[in-house]
Image (tube, coloured by chain):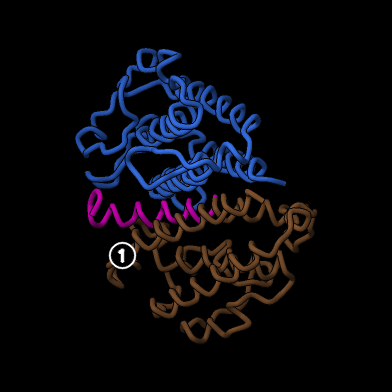
Amino acid sequence: MYHRDLIRWGLEETARDMAQALDGLTAEERRHQPTPEANHIDFIVWHLTRVEDMWIQQFAQGKPSIWEADGWAEKAGFHHDKLGYGMDIGFGYTIEQVRDLPAYDHDVMDQYVSAVRQSTLAYLDAATVEELSAPREVPVPQWNPFSVGFSLSRILVEQNQHIGHIAYIRGMQRGINK
Amino acid sequence: MDYRDIVRMALAEYSEDMARALDGLTPKERRFQPTLDSNHIDFLVWHIARVEDGWINTYARRTQTVWEQGGWAGRLGLPEEGGGFGYDVDQIRSLPEYDPVLLTEYAQAVRETTLAYLEQSTPEEIGRPRDVGWREPYCVGSALSHLLVEECQHVGQIAYIRGVLRGLDG
């Protein structure tokens, strides 16, 4: 069962690094786009959490996302039409959609981030190796067949690339290690 | 499925992402720094490979790095010691220019040692606490999870710089 420790450690470090990269940023710094086509930090934080929510709730457990089930869109001040694969998670967004993302409440978003992570860790504790390895079908053809184990490794890979973006944007605004 | 599969899948995925983020970039683009304090892609690519070499060969296998063993510093014209950790802005800016194809060969040589190590490792061995010297008690397993976390963040930085230069999906 060693895979659990490995993923848990990875997720813990990921969360620490994200908190550090976000620490003390102003609302303006979180919306900064170094070019009109570059993602801003508010978009990235929301997107990477929605993606984790999708993999763990919808794809791994066949449940609605926490975002939808607990009304986080309203709590955070989002009023988007659904697009893409029936889930509005920032995937495939145009530069206008990125730019026009609602300015949301950061404390509310932090609560949503924590709620998703708690659910991920609870799922990880309960899932058997067989369950993690079983081939699954999801509504995104290019990801099939996938396994929950793959989606866990993918969460680490994708989230950390996004956290790298956040840290880089921070560095562009504040300088090295600031 | 065990920890080996998770690590292998993650390594394969971020390496693919990295190859895509580097594809077709010019030497000038690879040295671009959006601000004076920002890392450039050449620095990141070298650092990523040196970090993997360090964790796998120095720390996990307790042997010479591929860097030392293969004389890569001389072949690439890069520093013998260190892999960019703690570099200041002047060191980043003045990193010698190197041949990206040769660097890719080095990175592949490192990856072979990583996959070979992973293959023969056991859960007992990688779970055993071991002193790293500079951080909390650690085991090879947590070094592996750290490797994935750190390298993916750097790959993200490469992709972000590419986006700053070329625009969305450019």
Density class for disc 1 (Cα within 10 Å; few <14, some 14-19, many ≥20) is few
Q: Mostly what secondary structure, the magenta segment? A: helix
At mark 1, the secondary structure is loop
Q: Is residue A56 above or below residue B74?
A: below
Q: Nearer the viewer, residue A12 or A66?
A: A12
Relative placement, left or right, of B6 versus B63 is right
A161 or B170, nearer to the observer: A161
Q: Residue at x 41, y 57 (%)?
A: A38
Residue A20 x/y as whole percent: 34, 60
Residue A151 sits in quarter: bottom right
Residue at 29% across / 70% down in the picture?
A28
Magenta run includes residue A176: yes
Q: Which residues are magenta?
A: A157-178
Relative to A173, say whether A82 is above or below: below
Q: Is residue A21 above or below residue B125?
A: below
Q: Position of residue B37 (x, y in %)?
A: 23, 45
Which chain is indicated by disc 1? A
| Front residue of B49 and B42 | B49
User: Disc 1 residue type?
Assistant: Asp
Q: Colour of chain B?
A: blue
Residue under pointer 1: A23
Query: Which quarter of the figure has residue B59?
Result: top left
**Residue at horizontal 22%, vertical 39%?**
B89
Query: Chain A shown in which color?
Result: brown
Can residue A168 be found in the magenta stretch?
yes
Q: Is residue B162 in sight in this rendering?
A: no
Percent of width and height locating residue A45: 45, 66
